[in-house]
Image: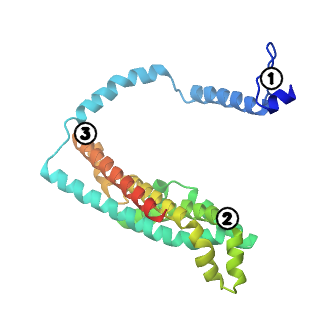
Amino acid sequence: MTERRAIGLPPPAGRTLALPVNWPRRLAYIGLAFYAIYAASTLDVSLARIARGLPQGAHFLARMWPPNTEAIKLDLMRQGLMESIEIAVLSTFFGILLSLPLGLLAARNLMPPWVSWTARTLTALFRSFNSVIVAILFVKAIGFGALAGILALIVGTMGFISKLFAEAIEEVDLKQVEAVRATGASFANVLIMGILPQVMARFAGFSAYQLDSNLRNSTMVGIVGGGGIGAALFTAYQRFDYDYVFTILLAIIAIVMVSELVSVQIRKIFQ
């Protein structure tokens, strides 16, 4: 039997190969299924509620059509979109600029343990809260406007990008790093010549992704007073101006799609 298996032949007729049963995995799946059923029961998730909501959803969508194309509202939407784009670009630029040194300090293959763990604790703290919650804190601290949204997205960018930067640095080939060190290069030259060439493509991909993410999140922080198109969207919802809401949503979708195309081109440049 062992020889037939080694050369890739099927088992003899009437005999089957017994595969080992992975009981921990099976128990994990069973436990997950039971917990999903329990959670659905405690949260009042049911098909009956979904069925009752379908006519209301259809009525809501019907009120959105056709999109509102009044010149005044389109001008307000354009201003809000431009502000959202500016918020996303500025928060991404400064967030990545601050994430580079923080990610470097969090890399365990370059820094002593007390430095890397301190930096990792700081990045975990930045990731602890959603950008909307951070935006609310900044709105309370410095008032309504784009500055609160920019600062909130900078914090979110530092939380995720610095962690991704640190993980990318930890995966570099240390032989190339040691070869640069052997020439007597300084620490800065080791980073530029030994580490940066290995991680530049991934850094560019992370940055492009974060720009795309901040463009979407700029709408969310605007709802709580952080500037951008979110304020106009929230106001339109409150006024039951659903055709204008649909117009704004279409514009946001278009901007996100363009951002995705730009992100793809950025990644291609650095590959």
Residue annotated with mark 2: 170
How far apart are the two marked residues, 2 and 1, measured between alpha carbons?
A: 42 Å
Q: How many marks?
A: 3
Crowding around mark 3 (Cα neighbors within 10 Å: few <14, some 14 to 19, many 20+) is many
Q: Determine the residue positioned at 44% across, 60% down.
A: 268
Q: Are marks 3 and 2 in contact (CB under 8 Å)?
A: no
Pointer 3 or 2: first along the chain: 2
Assign the N terminus to one quadrant of the image: top right
Mark 2 secondary-structure assignment: helix
Can you say whether 181 is above or below 137 in the image?
A: below
Q: On the image, which quarter does residue 199 sit in?
A: bottom right
Residue annotated with mark 3: 242
Can you say whether 49 is above or below 141 in the image?
A: above
Residue annotated with mark 1: 17
Q: Is residue 143 visible?
A: no
- Left/right placement of residue 102 relative to residue 232 reads right
Instruction: Pick whichever, 187 or 152, lies toward us.
Output: 187
Crowding around mark 2 (Cα neighbors within 10 Å: few <14, some 14 to 19, many 20+) is some
- Left/right placement of residue 136 relative to residue 227 reads right
